[in-house]
Amino acid sequence: MNSNTNNELHVIFGAGPVGQAVMNELVSKGKRVRMVSRSGKVNAPAGVEVCAGDAADPATTKTLSSGAAVVYNCTNPPYTQWPELFPALQAGVLEGAAAAGAKLVVMENLYMYGPTGGKTLTEDLPYNPTPRKGATRAQMAHDLMAAHQSGKVRVAVGRAADFFGAGVMNSAAGDRLFYPAVEGQAAQFIGNLDRPHTFTYMPDIGKALVILGERDAALGQAWHIPSPETVTTREFFTLAYQAAGQTPKMASMPKLMVKGLALIIPIVREVNEMLYEFEEPFIMDHSRFERAFGLKATPLREAIQTTVEWFKENPKGK
């Protein structure tokens, strides 16, 4: 392997599950990695440089991106504060990558497409976002591509559906599913359990984002990250309970109750905006990525089994 390539610096902003997945993939390839989080506290293996820094501050991001070949934006502000905080985080990381002359790889989700009436999600769909988070994500996507097209920075974007995997918490298929599954309790869900819904496995996200940083053919485009086969949410939940050796127990909160609670509880208000994702078929097509770069998703049963094992080994509250 080319030692000069291995000596390249890869800078990751954001130390949540996405940043950790990218870090793990880069470390497995022997790359030099710098992790940046606001607190500077990151569970990182030996050899990974860990720094504290505010990703929304361009002076900080320019300093911490210095010398980087690839910069990864894996930041994610509190769910109730996307419009207020997310654009500044993106702008700060972009300035850091641009100053370093580095490629910028950005993690996005699918909110910019908005409701499609069940149409399969492909990268060429027009943007039709809902207010607040959807509109924020759409504007950020436009801003990124404008920066690329202007020549300010070279950008590649990875988009994923709802995350699951070891350590994934605040997701429709995170701790609110896997802890009840391993404990034999009932999992609560918002939406229609019998609609097909794509979920994306976190290690596959790490592999995909690193590939986007490696391949110049990825630049200037958004790519849907390979995800396990799509099943209904009920089938996905059932597989989780079966992997945990438990009897499936699940309940869906009625739509009217969600709308009522949204009037008084901020986080439910934010979830209510995205309720369409769980009321209509939500199927993400990743075939373009697979054809271009050859990455295949981890099979669903294998991904769920590995996730269940992590939640068993890391009990709630410990």
Image (tube, rainbow, N blue to C red):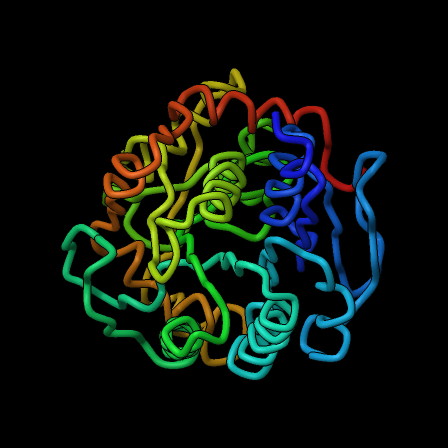
Residues 114 and 35: in front is 35
Residue 104 image point, x, y percent: 53, 60
Residue 150: which quarter of the image? bottom left
Residue 60 % position (x, y): 77, 74
Residue 71 image point, x, y percent: 61, 57
x 34%, y 30%: residue: 294
Q: Is residue 161 left or right of residue 5?
A: left
The residue nearer to you, when weighing 303 against 253, is 303
Residue placed furthest toward the top: 245
Q: How many marks?
A: 0
Residue plotted at (39% across, 69% down): 272
Quadrant containing the N terminus is: top right
- Residue 287 in picture, x, y percent from top left: 24, 39
Q: Can you tell which quarter of the image residue 215 is in? A: top left
Measured along the vertical axis of the image, is residue 141 above or below residue 285? below
User: Is residue 210 shown left or right of residue 312?
Assistant: left
Which residue is at a point 53% across and 75% down the rendered structure image?
82
Left or right of 86 in this view: 108: left
Residue 191's quadrant in the figure? bottom left
Is residue 136 among the parts visible in the rendering? yes
Residue furthest out toward the bottom: 84
Does residue 81 appear in the picture of this structure?
Answer: no
Residue nearest the viewer, comparing 229 with 19: 19
Of 179 and 137, which appears nearest the observer? 137
Is residue 26 depicted above or below 112 in this figure? above
Quadrant of the snapshot with the C terminus: top right
At 61% from the left edge and 75% from the top edge, which residue is drawn? 95
